[in-house]
Amino acid sequence: MNQIETTQHLKQLINHIDSGPELDTQATKQALETLETYECWSPFFRLLKKKLKNAKTATIDYYLSLTKVQVQYLEDVLEAGETSAQAVKKLELTFQQWTENYLPFVIEEDDWKTESVLLETAVDHFKDRREQIQAMERLCLLYEKKVFNEPKLNSSYKKLLNLDSLNIKALRYFKLIYSQNNNWEEVASVLESLIKASKHPQDIFRVAQELAAVRLYQLDEPKTAIDLLDKFCKESPLDSSTIKFDAFQRLGDWNGCLQVLKDCLLFIDNPETRSIIYYRMALIEEKLRNTTQAIKLYEKTIGSSPKFLEAYENMAYIYIQQKDWKNLLRCLDMLNDQLDDEQYKTQVSDAKSRISEGISSDQHA
């Protein structure tokens, strides 16, 4: 077909579209292909809009043709988004249908930006709320991993939370954002929602422990932190003893601190670690003026770790305060046996001599 014949054919086709009888499905398809080939967009759009206006003839193929031309030829992505949204609404497409039977035919593969525009426009028109949630999760993924549009990502996650207040992906996003901005009240609120949203016990343990840490270290709410650990983390394999100990310490509840350390001993076999715990317990007992119990714990400390010199020194100080010279000499003897530093050994020997001389003087007096 030469140029003159082609021009004449196009004129006849356009006249038929505008004033002739309605084309059947096959004829419409051929006409659209011809008009697209020669980029005769005005009659192309007139024909499509005529078909789409009639509910009986508005098929997915016509929506696809219009969207494809808007995206690939006219580069009018916003208008294409409106067409796509109308297709979802009028044809009652599911999100899966839109993803599998619509999107691949109107955009190039990996054209994430165009997909995000089309999806954002279409999302409100999916009839089922669960499909809207799926669509919003996909949209958030696009903005976060493919398009890298932070304002859009933020607004999309907010919309997702409005649809699904316990959506874990959205909650994790806002936990990160609020943490970066030191907005700890909001972080705590999000973590509380994450506890409700979590299904697996391990996830609940982890989130509750994180919430307890925020309540203690960022919001200075030690009582709330303890309550959270008692409520959610009793069966947790995660070690929350440091948080709980620090919470009791902030409250000045030394008996509570002691109980945390006692509970730790149930799960620890390593002698060095046990000696540290015994030592910390002894320090607290001293603070509570329970010197007899403190001495027992210092003895357990050196029983687990004979080189733990601070325990000998603290025990010796108690004996000095009590003027218990016999036990003081015994303590210094044990200390001397563990010393490697000659200067320190000399100091201990001198102290023992002075104490012995003092005891002897008292006995002769």
Image: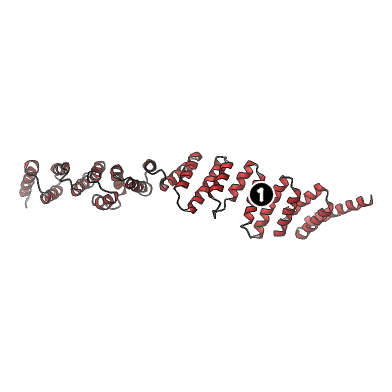
Q: Residue at x 52, y 45 (%)?
A: 211
How many residues crowd around disc 1 within 10 Å: few (fewer than 14), some, or many (20 or more)? many
Mark 1 highlights which residue? 258
In this rendered view, identify the residue nearer to me: 225 or 346: 225
Counting from the top left corner in percent of width and height, residue 272 is at: 66, 58
Residue 349 placement, left or right of 85: right
- The part of the image, by quadrant, that contains residue 58 is top left
In this rendered view, identify the residue nearer to me: 76 or 132: 132
Residue 319 placement, left or right of 106: right
Q: Is residue 174 visible?
A: yes
* Type of amino acid under label 1: Leu
In this rendered view, identify the residue nearer to me: 61 or 264: 264
Residue 121 placement, left or right of 293: left
Counting from the top left corner in percent of width and height, residue 96 is at: 29, 51
Counting from the top left corner in percent of width and height, residue 30 is at: 12, 51
Q: Is residue 7 above or below residue 334?
A: above
Q: What element carries label 1?
A: helix
Residue 40 placement, left or right of 205: left
Count how many numbered circles sit on residues in the image: 1
Counting from the top left corner in percent of width and height, residue 223 is at: 58, 42
